[in-house]
Amino acid sequence: MAAKKKTTKKSGKKAPQKVAKAKPRRNWIAWAYGNESEEASSGTLHKVYYGLLALSVVTLLGLALVTGINADEKFQDDYSEKLVDYYASGGGDKAALYEDDTSSQRFNKFYGGFFELVSGSVNRMLGYHPGPSYHRVRHLLNALFGVLILVIIAGWSRRMAGVRAGILAIILMLASPRLLGHSVMNPKDIPFAAGYLMGAFYLYRCLLSMPRPRWQDALGFVLGAALATATRAGGILIFCYSGLFLGIDFLLRYGVKGIAGEFKQFLTYAAYWIGSTLAGFGLALLFWPYALQAPLEHTKEALDLFSNYAVRIIILFGGENMFSDGIPSSYPLVWLGISVALSVIAGFFLSLLTFPALVKKHGVIPVVLLLFVTIFPLAYIMFKESALYDGWRQLLFIYPTVLVLGALGFEYLAQRFTSRTKWAGPAIIGIVVLLSADALLFTARNPALAYVYFNPLAGGIKGAFGQYELDYWGLSSRQAVEWMEDEGILHPGMDTLTIGTTFPYNVRRQLDLSYKKKVKIQYIRYHRRFSESWDYGIFPSRFIRGPHLRNNTWPTSKTVHRIEANGVPLAVVEYDPDQFAMQAEALLKAGQAPQAIQRFQQEVAKYPDNEQGWNGLASAQVSIGDGDQALTSAEKALEIAPDNETALYLKGYAYLTKNNGPEALNTFNHLLQVDPENAMAYYWIGEIYKQRKELETAFNNFRKAIEYNPKLKQAYLGIATIFEEQGDMENASRYRNAAAQF
C-alpha cells in the first residue's frame, strides 16, 4: 500500500518510468539468485540426514582420540604456551612475540593465535603439560572445527538444493579421509578452513537478503572471517570477496547509474562492507599479539612473508625426490587427483558439466560464489608457483566447497531422473556410496592414519608407496610407542633406554609421564642412523628415498614391528642389541679403520639388507686405500638403496683411488642427478677436469661447490691452484686466504 500511495503523488509522466525501471530489476535479481530449495521431502530423508550428521560428529571425535601427534605441533605447542602467558600477564610477558628468537620458531608470531590460545587455556585449566593428555585435548578441540566444517557443508547444500543434497554432502565428507584425518590433528589448516568456509557461507546468506541482510547472517560472516584471519593472515581474502560480491550485487540491483541515482543505498553497501571488515579484522586482532602491536604494518608483513615463504625441504613427488620450492605447477592438481575419493572427483566435475543447469536452478551468484572461493585460490597459487609440500594440506580450505559443489551436481542428476523413476534419488545416493566405498573403508581400517589415503587412480596406498609422501608428519610414532608399551619395553619400572628417531618431538610427547624420565630420545638422521647409540629406533618412511622404498628392501631385518595402513609400512620399530654398526662408526671416527672394518663386516653378515652397514664398510675401506673392496661394498649398498647419495659418493671416490677418472666422473654426475646441490660431487668433478687441464670447466665446478657449501676449503684451494697456473697470483692469494679461514 505504501508503494501505491507514493506513486499517486507523482505526476503521470513519472509513474510509468518508475514501473518500467522496477521490472528488469526483479528479473535481474531472479536470474542472479534463483530460489533456495527447501523442497518437501520425506520424514525418512530427514532422519537419514540427522542420523548421518550425528554419525559424522561421533566419527570426528573418535578419530581425535586415536590420532597421533604431528611434527609441526612442536611449533604450535610452544606458541600456545607463550600465548597463554602473554594474555595472562596482560601483555607483560612478550615471549609470544619472539623478539630475540632467530630460530624457525620465530615464524609463529605471523600466525593468528585463536586456536592456540583456546587450547592452551583449556590445558592450563586442566593442569595438563605437553604429553599424551595435553595433545588429546588439542585434538578434540581441533575436531570441533571439523564438526563446524561438516555442519556448514551439510547446511549449505541443504539450503540450496534440499535435504537429499545435504545427505550427499555428508557422505562426501565421510568419504574424505584426508579432510577427516587433518580435522583432528592439524591446528593450522583446519581452523583456517573452518573460518574461510563460514565466512563464504554467511556471505552467501547476506547476499540473498541484501540490501538488508539479517543480523544473524552478518554476525556469522564477521565471526567466520575473524576466525580465518585469527588463524592466518590469508583470512583477509574473505573481506576482499565480500567487497567484490557486494559490489556485484549492487550493480545487479541498481546498475552503474545507481551509484549516483541510489547514492544512499550505495553508502549502505559501503557501510556494510567497511563495518564488517573492521569488525572482523578487529576481532581477529584480539587473538594475534604480533598484529596488535602494529595492525596494518604487521598484517602486511605476514601476508608478504607467506606469499613468498619458501619452506625448502626434500619431498617425494611422482617417485622423484625434489626440493619443495622446485615443484612443478601441476603439483596440487596431481595430489588432489590421486588422494581424493572418486565420488568427490565425479561430483565436482559433474557440477562443472551441469553448470548452466545449476545456474538456472539456483541462480548465478550462489553457484559462481561457490566456484570462485574454490578455484580462485588454487589458480592463484599455481600462477604464482608458490612452494607447496606435505601433499595439499595448505589447500584444505578450498576443499569443503568442492564437497558442496559435488552434492549439488549429484542432486541435479537425481532430480533430472526423478520424473522417470521414483528410484532415481536412492539410486544416486547408492552410486555415491559405491564410489565412496574405497575411501570409507580406508578410514574404517586406519582410523588413526586416515590422512595417508590414496584413491584407486594412484593404485591406492600400495601404488603410492615410494612415489609420494605417506605419513609425512610422523603420526605413526604413536602406534610405535604404544606397541613398545604393550610389549613391556616401556613401563614405570623399566631400566633406562635410548630411542633413536627421525621424529623426536612426536615420540617424546607420546611418552607417558610415569616412565618418561627413564627414556632418552635421540634425534637421528635416517641416513646416518648409526652415528649415535640407541637401543630402539622409531623410523617413519619420511626421509627415505623413493627408489629405496620401491626396491622393497625397507623395512630391514632389524625391524621388530611395523606400523601399516592397508598392508603398506608407514613406520618401523628397529632393535639393535649388537650395535656393531654404531661401534664401527665410533672406531672409524677415532681413526681405527681396521677395527672398524671388522665391526662393519659383523654388521653386514648379520644384517645384509642394511645399506648403512655397507656404506660404513666402504668408507672404512676407502680410508685404508682398498678401492676394490670399497667399490664392492658401495655397489652392495646401491643394490639395497638405489640412488643412495652416500653410496654413490663412496663409489665415485673409490674409482678415484683406482685412478679411473671416467667412471668416477660418471658416478659423480649420477650423484648430481640425485642431489643437484651436492658440493662434494662438484668438487671432485672439478678436480677431475683440473687434472685434464680443462681449467674453465674445473673452475665452474669449484664455484658450484662453494655455492652449495661456502665453507668447503678444498674448493677454494682448487680455484687458487687454477689462478696460479694462469699466473694470476692476486686472485690465487685471495682464494688461499679465504680457504685459510676454514
Image (cartoon, rainbow, N blue to C red):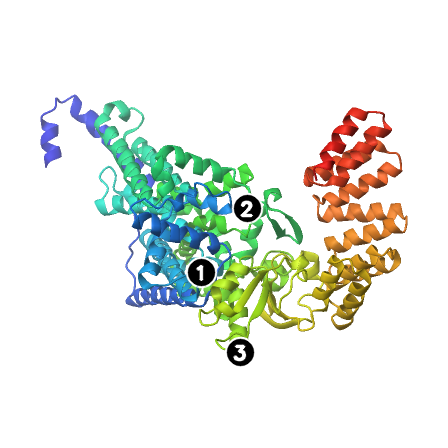
> What residue is rendered at 33% in x and 41% in y?
285
Looking at the image, do the residues carrying marks 1 and 3 touch, with CB atoms under 8 Å apart?
no
* Residue type at numbered disc 2: Leu
The disc at residue 180 is 1
Q: Nearer the viewer, residue 742 or 613?
A: 742
Residue 406 seen by the camera: no
Q: CA distance from mark 3 to mark 2?
A: 41 Å
Is 48 on the left or on the right of 330, as rendered? left
Mark 3 or mark 1, which is nearer the start of the sequence?
Answer: 1
Q: CA distance from mark 1 to mark 2?
A: 20 Å
* Residue type at numbered disc 3: Gly
The N terminus: image quadrant: top left
Q: CA distance from mark 1 to mark 3?
A: 32 Å
Residue 168: x and y in percent read 40, 60
Q: Residues within 10 Å of mark 2 (few under 14, many from 20)?
A: many
Image quadrant of residue 690? top right
Q: Which residue is mark 3?
A: 488
Q: Comparing marks 1 and 3, which lies closer to the viewer?
A: 3
Mark 2 or mark 3, which is nearer the start of the sequence?
Answer: 2
Q: Comparing marks 3 and 2, which lies closer to the viewer?
A: 3
The C terminus: image quadrant: top right
* Residue type at numbered disc 1: Leu
Q: Residues within 10 Å of mark 3 (few under 14, many from 20)?
A: few
Looking at the image, do the residues carrying marks 1 and 2 touch, with CB atoms under 8 Å apart?
no
**Which SS class for mark 2?**
loop
Q: Comparing marks 1 and 2, which lies closer to the viewer?
A: 2
Q: Which residue is mark 2?
A: 388
Question: Is 686 above or below relative to 620?
Answer: above
Image quadrant of residue 709? top right
Q: Nearer the viewer, residue 733 or 191?
A: 733
> What residue is rendered at 27% in x and 31% in y?
270
Residue 656: x and y in percent read 86, 48
